[in-house]
Image (spheres, helix red, strand yellow):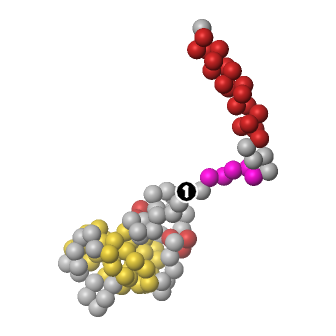
Amino acid sequence: MKQGSIIKGEITAIKPYGAFVKVDKEYVGLIHISEFSDGFVRGIEDYVNIGDVIDLKILNVSNNRLSLSYKALHKKKKRYNIELEAGFDPLKEKLSEWIKNYDLKNDE
């Protein structure tokens, strides 16, 4: 096992600060709560459950203990909330006004 490697591990326990992982008979690891997401993590169960076998990245190896990252391999795409009912109509309505104001400012 070495830093930077990608491994499979089984989630064996979930605590408020992270999840414990069994990699094989020799190695166990911890995914700290900060290694699940770049954003706020309300609950680790939003990402993994006990018994899940997942791919993880090794951040550090110390004796037979691994520091692991979930977020390094499982980045979620950011979602943007768009009012679908309004669509782009508000933008369409304001665009000509913004262009006109921009032209007026630059003419001064």
Residue sitting at 53 percent across and 60 percent down?
Answer: 77
Which corner quadrant of the image does residue 34 belong to? Answer: bottom left
Residue 4's place in the image compared with 53, above or below, is: above
Residue 60, image x, y percentages: 25, 69
Which corner quadrant of the image does residue 53 belong to? Answer: bottom left
Would residue 100 be found to the left or right of residue 69 on screen?
A: right
Would residue 100 be found to the left or right of residue 21 on screen?
A: right
Q: For the view shown, which residue lies furthest in the top direction?
A: 108
Residue 88, image x, y percentages: 73, 43
Residue sitting at 37 percent across and 74 percent down?
Answer: 56
Q: For the view shown, which residue lies furthest in the left direction?
A: 63
Which corner quadrant of the image does residue 90 belong to? Answer: top right
Would residue 1 be found to the left or right of residue 56 on screen?
A: left
- Judging depth in this view, the residue of 101 and 17 nearest the camera is 101
- Judging depth in this view, the residue of 99 and 82 nearest the camera is 99
Would residue 14 be found to the left or right of residue 31 on screen?
A: right
- Judging depth in this view, the residue of 76 and 101 nearest the camera is 101
Q: Is residue 38 visible?
A: yes
Magenta highlight: main SS: loop
Please identify the quadrant where the N terminus is shown: bottom left
Please identify the quadrant where the C terminus is shown: top right
Report which residue position mark 1 lands on. Answer: 78
Residue sitting at 72 percent across and 25 percent down?
Answer: 97
- Per the image, label 1 sits on a secondary structure element best described as loop
The residue carrying pointer 1 sits among few (fewer than 14), some (14 to 19) or many (20 or more) residues within 10 Å by Cα, namely: few
As for residue 22 lying within the magenta part, the answer is no
Q: Is residue 17 visible?
A: no
Q: Which residues are magenta?
A: 80-84
Residue 36, image x, y percentages: 45, 66
Residue 13, image x, y percentages: 44, 81
